[in-house]
Amino acid sequence: MHDCVFVMLLFLLLMGAIGAEEDPALCKMLGNPEFPLLSKDGDITIGGAFSIHSQISKPSLSFTDTPEPLTCSRINFAEFHFAQTMIFAIEEINNSSSLLPNISIGYKIFDTCGSTLPSTRAAMGLMNGQEKTLGNNCSSQSSVHAVIGASESSSTIVMLQVLGIFQVPVISHFATCACLSNRKEYPSFFRTIPSDYYQSRALAKLVKHFGWTWVGAVRSDNDYGNNGMATFITAASQEGVCIEYSEAISRTADRREQVARVVGVIKSGSARVLIAFLAQGEMNILLEEALKQNLTGLQWVGSESWITAGHLATKRYSGILMGSLGFAIRKTKIKGLQEFLFQVNPSQDPQNNLLREFWEATFGCRFQSRLRGQTSCTGSERLQDINNPFTDVSELRISNNVYKAVYAVAHALHNMLECGQSGETVNHPCIWKDDLEPRQVVKHLQDVNFTLKSEEREYFDGNGDPAATYELVNWQRNRAGDVVFVAVGNYDASLPNGKQFTMDGIKITWAAESPKRPESVCSESCLPGFRQAVMKGKPICCFSCVPCAAGEISNSSSSAECSRCPIEYWSNEDHSQCVLKVMEFLSYGDTMGALLASFSLFGAGLTLLVFSVLFRFRHTPLVKASNSELSFLLLFSLTLCFLCSLTFIGRPSEWSCMLRHTAFGITFALCMSCILAKTIAVVIAFKANRPSRTVPQCSAALQRTSVLSCTLLQVFVCLLWLTLAPPNPYKNTAHATERIILECDLGSSIWFWVVLGYIGLLAVLCFILAFLARKLPDNFNEAKFITFSMLIFCAVWVAFIPAYVSSPGKFTVAVEIFAILASSFGLLFCIFAPKCYILLLKPERNTKRHMMGRNQSKSL
């Protein structure tokens, strides 16, 4: 219904501006039916709109009957203080010889009653200048050149919708809605208080700074609260802060029931921090209901509207609001203001009802009282003896904004009238212009840049906003037990993002004056080693703690994600740190490494023992018959084969990697060459009909040549391998995630298989030749033993291939060592065990006759 009436009144205003001269009754309707509450004539007139009264009657609205006039009551001392501050600034300028010399400024101050309908009435009164006169014509242009006000965003928007049509500049001292920065909608609006866009973002940073990620929110159900809270919620989400609930409070007929419901929501919520984006009127309503329901223990974070409101800092509300935090406009001192306020008296204008009402409300008396027992006002009472928001000048924050707004208009007019710009005369009188239009004032307001006596620099940006700077205020008690507002930090939106918010290091008082900062989170912080997992259907601030996976860590509490360790690192047991991965290789300290090394040394020692036995019996027929030179060379190569396995044990290095594979290839090639030469010699010797006479014995030189050439071929292959693609140490991180396998990369697997294949080729040749000689005389059948040894050798290395390919980590090396040892032991036992048996245990067989016995019997 209120919106309908406002549309009707706005329509009438437009119609009146166009055709008011044709309809005097309409012109009278458009004017304010009352005088301005405070006024003074001057060459230039500045309008004022303040919520001097805080309560408004609600007349019945109908489209058939004339609406009853709106009635405002209950004087607001803080707003009356603002109005007087405006008058003080105007008087100070009028007495100045440097600012607007010889130009007097007048004023007309109207009451908006903190509501939209009276604000519309005030705007029309400021526009038309139509007071209670008998004139029949509306003035053709605005009666004021600029307007200071209003004190609420919604009231300011309503006034702009009227005054903005005629481009009358409006400079607000308290309207903070970010929506007013829209230059397309409000081209004639300016303000001396920062936009809520900056305050809301500052509040979000404040909440995040103290680790409050789970908060409740309550706001005024108007442009100020709705826009400010919307910006805060957006900024809070960017900071990782969640809103448990967001409730609105409006000044409606059913507000008691509504506010009771809101307080119930706050009490039932789990958030211990409450963001209160409320105008003072809604804050008063909320606090009264909070007292009824005993709402305590909350950390209040407030907007600039109420965070420094002196009338709230009383014992009545201290149990609820003590420890509150919020951003406020910087306070300052205005020299001479207190003395000016003390001079306010009904005797200044005996006909002014507002002064009389103010006096009666201040001193609790009545002029011309007729009621029995009621104190009569004399007018001689002293304001110096009163302590209320009107006389309090200790927190000049918003009052300073009023003061700056008046001076901004004065400087704009000063520049507009070209004051003091004639030749060498500094204080040249202003060049008066009869056609002084408000739209010209708007243009010059945009360009003002001046410094006050307090050394504050004032200017407007492209949106009509001032520089956004705040003080972080904390409610604390002084030694006397009174509540004081202590600045504990600052916020400057003009600074880089990381430096905007600073704390002064002053100790903060928390909710209920607790020494410990309150906690307000939906879920407790996850310990290091855990990550936050969002719970389905709940905000991101509500989460469960899930352990980090293997190889991942979180080294701080409340980590949203676990970070993966670098490739050479792994997570510790707590998953809170990355530690170097365990380097895995076959070392002598391992049980397996020590056991294999023992077998290797045992095999080498056993081979040397066999060597010494054969050397001891080197002149006996058995040793001579088995080609002693090749036997000793074979034992030497077997010793090297046993010892080369030691190069596979230990931390891989460039030299060890090259040595282990080449030593393996060359020693086994030497070993197979010796066996091959021995086998060939046996076959040739015993395949002849008369081996001792008709067939020449295989010369030693030929045997040496064959062994040397077969071995040198392998040496050549190994040299090519080392030259073209040598083996090198390699950290294998792909096979095992939790450890690093130090191994020797083959460089080129082709060369490895060529080396192994060559050994296999020699072994196959040995096996074939030995197999062909398996039916030689039993008394000297060395070929049979070579056949068995080659069977074992080939079986071991054939089994080695799949085992080598499939074995993980250090077991790959162990398999290779096992194959070397197994094949070496097989050769040693199969070829030399029978000889040692005869040499040591059956010496009677070690005779030439016995060696040739069976062959001779056959020849007979």
Image: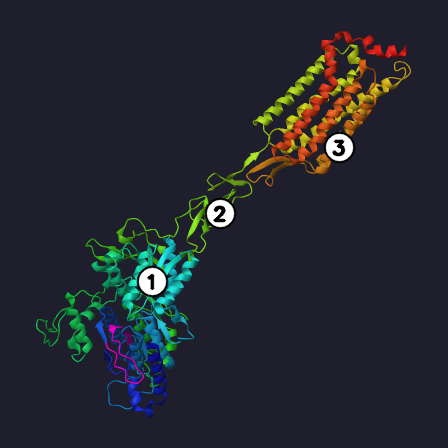
The residue identified by callout 1 is: 218
Q: Position of residue 666 (x, y in %)?
A: 73, 28
Mark 3 or mark 1: name the one nearer the start of the chain. Answer: 1
How far across and down, in percent of the image, does residue 673 sit? 78, 25
Splitting the image into 4 quarters, where does residue 581 fall?
Answer: top right
SS at badge 3: helix
Asked whether disc 2 touches disc 1, contact meaning CB atoms under 8 Å apart, the reply is no
Name the foreground residue: 70 vs 108.
70
Name the quadrant of the N terminus: bottom left
Q: SS for tag 2? A: loop
Comparing 844 with 405, the one in front is 844
Q: Nearer the viewer, mark 3 or mark 1?
A: 1
Figure colour scheme? rainbow
- Residue 585 in sight: yes
Query: Residue 59 location, x and y as percent?
Result: 26, 78
How far across and how far down the image is residue 459, in percent? Answer: 36, 69
Residue at 86 percent across and 12 percent down: it is 855
Q: Is residue 19 above or below residue 144?
A: below
Find out whether residue 624 is within the magenta segment: no
Quadrant for residue 683, please give it: top right
Q: Is residue 412 visible?
A: no
Question: Mark 2 belongs to which amino acid?
Answer: Cys
Please provide the residue range marked out in magenta. Answer: 48-71
CA gap, disc 2 to disc 1? 35 Å
Q: Earlier in the sequence, mark 2 or mark 1?
A: 1
Q: CA distance from mark 3 to mark 2?
A: 49 Å
Q: Is residue 65 found inside the magenta-colored segment of the image?
A: yes
Query: Which residue matches tag 2?
Result: 562
In the visual, does 568 lie left or right of 73? Answer: right
Amino acid type shown at disc 1? Val
Identify residue for label 3: 757
